[in-house]
């Protein structure tokens, strides 16, 4: 079976490259310097964060949006001070988290949401200070809580810990 997606576009790409080479070959000094300045301006507008949009203070991130002060993240959105995370959303101060949302100060978590001060969690939601749980919800220090009691205790702990 033919791969029409890549082969069908190859002549177009080759043609565009040939046209670009002709254009560069025919440039004078002024036109060359204008083009060079345009390219330099585009690069400085997004240094080291290819494909990212509206990120501030991020380094080595790719395809992220609306993040702040993140480092080495991929396809994250609305995250702040995260490191080595991918496909995360609205996380703060997380490290090496993957496909997580609304997590705070958590590390090495996957497919989870609303974790606070958690580590090595997988497919879990609404956990506080828990470590190594998988497919668990409403846990504090690995102890299960009823939903309403969980939120009461988390409110108290957040105030106590300043989180």
Image: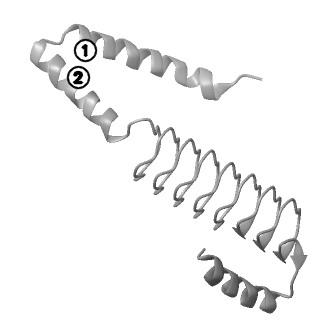
Q: Is residue 116 above or below residue 94?
A: below
Quarter-of-image position of residue 161: bottom right
Q: Looking at this rendering, what residue extends furthest in the top direction?
A: 25
Q: Position of residue 19 (x, y in %)?
A: 33, 15
Mark 2 or 1 closer to N-term? Answer: 1
**Residue in the foreground of this view, choosing between 21 and 5:** 21
Q: Quadrant of residue 122?
A: bottom right
* Residue in the foreground of this view, choosing between 126 and 118: 118
How many labels, in total? Answer: 2
Q: Which mark is residue 36?
A: 2
Name the residue at the left extreme: 30
Helix, strand or loop at disc 1? helix
Give the left or right position of residue 13, taking residue 93 as reference: left
Say if 24 sits above or below 60 in the image.
Answer: above
Q: Residue at x 53, y 55 (%)?
A: 81
CA–CA distance in space, label 2 to label 1: 13 Å
| Element at label 2 | helix
Q: Position of residue 3 (x, y in %)?
A: 69, 24
Which residue occupies 57% across, 53% down?
82
Rendered view: 39 above or below 64: above
On residue 5, which mark appears? none
> Quick one: quadrant of the N terminus?
top right
At horizontal 86% and vertical 88% (from top left) the residue drawn is 146
- Which residue does the numbered mark 1 point to in the structure image? 23
Residue 23, percent across and down? 25, 14
Residues at circles 2 and 1 in contact by the CB criterion of under 8 Å: no
Residue 32: percent from left, percent from top: 18, 17
């Amino acid at each position: 079976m033919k791969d029409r997606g890549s082969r069908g576009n190859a002549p177009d790409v080759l043609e565009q490259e040939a046209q670009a080479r002709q254009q560069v070959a025919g440039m004078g000094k002024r036109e060359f310097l204008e083009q060079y300045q345009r390219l330099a301006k585009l690069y400085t507008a997004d240094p080291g964060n290819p494909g990212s949009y509206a990120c501030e203070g991020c380094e080595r991130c790719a395809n992220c949006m609306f993040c702040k002060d993140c480092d080495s993240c991929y396809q994250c959105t609305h995250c702040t001070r995260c490191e080595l995370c991918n496909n995360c959303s609205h996380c703060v101060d997380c490290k090496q988290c993957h496909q997580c949302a609304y997590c705070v100060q958590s590390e090495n978590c996957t497919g989870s949401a609303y974790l606070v001060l958690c580590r090595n969690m997988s497919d879990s939601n609404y956990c506080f200070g828990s470590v190594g749980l998988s497919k668990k919800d409403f846990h504090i220090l690995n102890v299960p809580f009823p939903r309403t009691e969980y939120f009461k205790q988390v409110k108290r702990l957040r105030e106590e810990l300043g989180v």
